[in-house]
Structures are given as C-alpha cells and as structure tokens.
C-alpha cells in the first residue's frame, strides 16, 4: 500500500528546513505544556518525532482508503436535501477513518485536545 508521506521525499525535506526549530518552538509554546501533560513534546526532537509519526499515519490513510475512495467521491459528490448537505458515502468513510485515527482534533492545542 502507498504511503503519501513516506513515499514523497520532498515532504521530509521541508520538515528538515532550518526554520522548523523556530516554527515548532512557537507552535509548542516553547514546550511549556511538557510540565503539565506527559504526552506533550518535551523538546524539539520529541516534537519532530511525534510529527513524523503522525504524518506516517496520515500518509498511510491517504495512500490507502482515501485514495481508493477518491474516484467514487467525485462521482457521488455531496447532495443538498431539505436544506442540509450530506456527504458522499465514501467521504463519510474517509471522515470516520480520520476520526478513528484521532486526527480530527489535531489542530487544537494540547490543553483543549484532552
């Protein structure tokens, strides 16, 4: 099965950019949450290891089920019924898969993601 992250060396290249230390330090609020939450990154290397692992999971999901569903998502498309939008069945499958993988709250700060 394809992995859209590990199979694309350009993505790893961007994560190794010298500005990443500054970006991660800002995103992780200078690792202040490490004192409160045992799952929060302790330092830059710990954060990058976590980011890499999450991206591997996302790459696997995208290279697998989401890629498989792409054509059918395009064919079915969303529908508006009674003033409400309903997703194509494969889109809902993709969202359920991402939810089960714990990816839906990924953009939230550690404090709110608990």
Image (tube, rainbow, N blue to C red):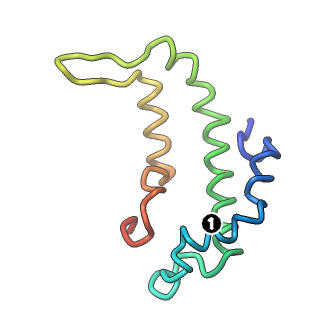
**Residue visible at 37% across and 19% down in the picture:** 78
Q: For the view shown, which residue lies furthest in the left direction?
A: 82
Side (left or right) of 90 relative to 52: left
Label 1 crowd bin: few (<14), some (14–19), many (20+), radius 10 Å = few
In screen coordinates, is 96 left or right of 69?
Answer: left
| Along the viewing direction, whichever of 108 and 60 lies nearer the viewer | 108
Residue where numbered disc 1 is placed: 23
Q: Nearer the viewer, residue 34 or 76?
A: 34
Q: In percent of the image, x 60 and y 74: which residue is there?
A: 25
Taking 52 as reference, is 67 above or below it?
above
Q: Residue placed at 80% from the left, 45% from the top?
A: 10
Q: Residue furthest bottom?
A: 35
| Image quadrant where residue 69 sits | top right
| Image point (44%, 47%), residue name | 99
The residue furthest top is: 75
| Number of residue marks | 1
Residue 44 is situated, as x and y percent measured from the top left of the image, at 67, 75
Q: Secondary structure at mark 1?
A: helix
* Left or right: 24 in relation to 45: left
- Give the image location of residue 89, x and y in percent: 41, 23
Q: Is residue 90 above or below residue 28?
A: above
In the depicted structure, whether residue 73 falls above or below residue 97: above
Question: As displayed, is residue 39 above or below residue 82?
Answer: below
Q: Where is residue 94 drawn, in percent x and y?
A: 49, 34
The location of residue 101, given as percent across then percent down, is 51, 50
Where's the C terminus, which quadrant? bottom left
Q: Quadrant of the N terminus?
A: top right
Is 2 situated left or right of 99 in this image? right
């Amino acid at each position: 099965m394809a992995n859209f992250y590990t199979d694309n060396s350009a993505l790893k290249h961007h994560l190794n950019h010298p500005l990443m230390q500054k970006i991660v330090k800002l995103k992780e609020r200078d690792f202040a949450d490490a004192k409160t939450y045992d799952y929060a990154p302790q330092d830059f290397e710990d954060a990058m290891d976590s980011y890499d692992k999450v991206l591997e999971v996302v790459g696997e999901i995208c290279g697998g089920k989401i890629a498989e569903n792409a054509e059918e998502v395009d064919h079915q498309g969303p529908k508006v019924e009674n003033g409400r939008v309903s997703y194509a069945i494969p889109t809902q499958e993709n969202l359920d898969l991402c939810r089960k993988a714990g990816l839906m709250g990924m953009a939230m700060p550690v404090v709110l993601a608990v």
